[in-house]
Amino acid sequence: MLVGILVPIALFIGVFTMIIFLRKYENEERMAMIERGMDPKTTARPRISPSGTLRFALLAIGSGIGLLVANMLKNSELVEEEVAYFSMVLLFGGLGLLISYLVQLRQEEKEKRAREREIV
């Protein structure tokens, strides 16, 4: 009973503390940039690259397909429930990551060929 009350409280306190420290260090970083004569607004924050978005999307699609196949396997009683879900999510999630790698590799190869044509 006590654990059921303490876990949400500890979680809330942990998240709140993390946000406070993140803001504190972000402010210290800005102050250090100002002291060095840099403009903090001109530094660009890292953006999610299209390849990162593709990787995440294909991982999510693969995991979703894995859940669907695992549910079918569980309902047909060919495989135990835990084995079906873990194996299919990992298998199809890995396939999604592999596909994203191959797409990214192909895209980099096209860009390399385009740069070579521009040089010649």
Image: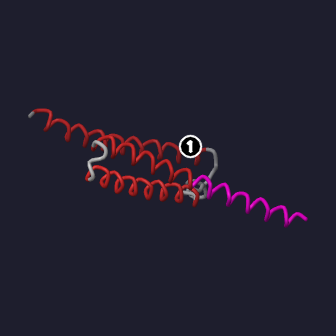
Residue depicted at 46% across the width and 42% down the height: 25
Which quadrant would the C terminus be assigned to in this image?
Answer: bottom right
The spot of residue 64 in percent (x, y) is: 38, 57
The spot of residue 75 in percent (x, y) is: 25, 53
Residue segment shown in magenta: 100-120
Taking 28 as reference, is 88 left or right?
A: left
Please check the rendered image and state whether residue 113 is part of the magenta-colored stretch, yes or no.
Answer: yes
The spot of residue 76 in percent (x, y) is: 27, 52
The spot of residue 2 in percent (x, y) is: 10, 32
Indicate the secondary structure of the residue bearing disc 1. Answer: helix
Q: Main secondary structure of the magenta part?
A: helix
Which kind of residue does numbered mark 1 sit on? Ala
Taking 29 as reference, is 85 left or right?
A: left
Which of the pair 107/34 is nearer the observer? Answer: 107
Residue depicted at 17% across the width and 35% down the height: 6
Which image quarter: residue 100? bottom right
- Total numbered badges shown on the rendered structure: 1
Provide the residue designation for mark 1. Answer: 32
- Position of residue 95 relative to residue 120, above or below, is above
Residue sitting farthest toward the top: 2
